[in-house]
Amino acid sequence: MKHLYILFLVISVLGFSQEKYLTKSGVLNFEASVDTFEEIKATNDNVTAIFNASNGQFAALALVKGFRFKNALMEEHFNENYAESNEYPKAIFKGELTNFSLETIQSTYTMNGTLTFHGVTKSLKNVAVELISSENAFTFKGSFEIAPTDFDIEIPKIVRSKIADSVSVVFEFEMEKK
């Protein structure tokens, strides 16, 4: 039931159209490692994303507890102390490819939109997106940088030097026509 609710939420963001592409197995990776300390890296491979090819609108929804770390204790700290995933269970991106047209599909675009995480919504501008198209599918690949402080995430002084000031987020969504 929870997945059905999420799917309807994402679809309602984009409206109804004939050119919808969807995945429930998109991949988000993030890394906040500092060279001399333990790797801080996680992957979520159950991200729902939808693309409306008639107008270039894109939306993605990730359950925060879906991020997996190599270290279970690190995952627990991420969910309880930093992301506060019980209070803020979802990360949502809503955006649009700049100058997208089905008639003249390019291999690269920029995307502008908003990212909501930890109860804070921030604009993301000029996110480079590699777009691979086939007859009934689109694949989006790209990355962007965010700062924990932009999302009101407080890093305790005792561990601040072990966590990067800038978090690298890499995404890949293979979406099929629905």
Image: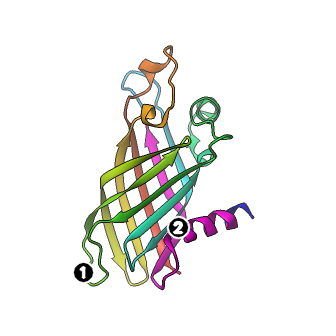
Up-down: is 15 above or below 173? below
- Count neighbours of disc 1 (C-alpha within 10 A) and say few if under 14, some if 14 to 19, many if 20 or more: few
Side of 67 relative to 137 (left or right)? right
Residue 69 point in image, percent of width and height = 56, 39
- Count neighbours of disc 2 (C-alpha within 10 A) and say few if under 14, some if 14 to 19, many if 20 or more: few
Q: Which residue is mark 1?
A: 104
Up-down: is 73 above or below 61? above
First in residue order: circle 1 vs circle 2: 2
Up-down: is 175 above or below 95? below
Residue 79 point in image, percent of width and height = 62, 36
Tag 2: residue type? Val
SS under mark 2: helix
Which residue is found at the position 36% from the left and 60% from the top? 141
Tag 1: residue type? Thr
Residue 45 point in image, percent of width and height = 54, 55
Side of 48 relative to 135 (left or right)? right
Magenta stretch encompasses residue 57: no
Magenta region, residue range: 4-31
Question: Which residue is farthest right?
Answer: 1
Q: Which residue is mark 2?
A: 13
Which residue is found at the position 57% from the left and 70% from the top? 12
Which residue is found at the position 52% from the left and 67% from the top? 13
